[in-house]
Image (spheres, helix red, strand yellow):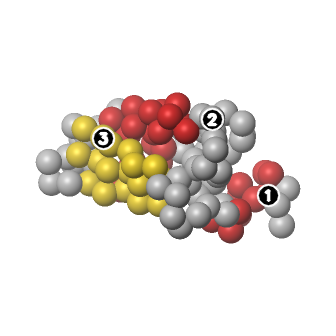
Amino acid sequence: MATQEEVLQALKECYDPEIPVNVVDLGLIYGVEITPEEKVIVTMTLTTPGCGMAYQIAMQVKERAKQVPGVKEATVTVVWEPKWDPSRMSEAAKKKLGIP
């Protein structure tokens, strides 16, 4: 069975095409749950509700999660609460984007 850390590490390969930082470091991943049936449930958000790439990013996250050894199925739920803001970003992401 996969671990939450393995899934998060894999999701670091997923990017919003408009931002050169992965979805984990951007703080877009709100939760990763792994069921006993080896299903991964990712709860995430996007930087803005009007993001035109919402579907593509969610599908990229879903497909990448499914590739983790020990994962049989994956679902992604996009939520808008709590609202994303730059404080959710990792220090490395803030530095890369020039945010204090």
Residue occupying image coordinates x 23% and y 46%: 39
Relative placement, left or right, of 73 versus 63 is left
Vertical order, 97 against 72 (above or below): below
Relative placement, left or right, of 73 versus 80 is left
The answer to whether the residues at label 2 and label 1 have Cβ atoms under 8 Å apart is no
CA distance separating discs 1 and 3: 31 Å
Name the mark nearer the viewer: 2 or 3.
Answer: 2
> Is residue 47 or residue 20 the one in the foreground?
47
Q: Mark 3 packing: few (<14 Cα in 10 Å), some, or many (20+)? A: many
Q: Name the kind of residue labelled 3 in the image.
A: Ala
Relative placement, left or right, of 83 versus 70 is right
Which residue is denoted by mark 1 in the rendering?
A: 95
Name the mark nearer the viewer: 2 or 1.
Answer: 2
Name the mark nearer the viewer: 1 or 3.
Answer: 3
| Residue 31 in picture, x, y percent from top left | 41, 60
N-terminal-most mark, 1 or 3: 3
N-terminal-most mark, 2 or 1: 2
Q: Name the kind of residue labelled 1 in the image.
A: Lys
* Label 2: element kind: loop
| Residue 45 in picture, x, y percent from top left | 53, 53
Which residue is denoted by mark 2 in the rendering?
A: 52
Which residue is denoted by mark 3 in the rendering?
A: 74
N-terminal-most mark, 2 or 3: 2
Vertical order, 16 against 91 (above or below): above
Relative placement, left or right, of 10 versus 87 is left
Q: Quadrant of the C terminus?
A: bottom right
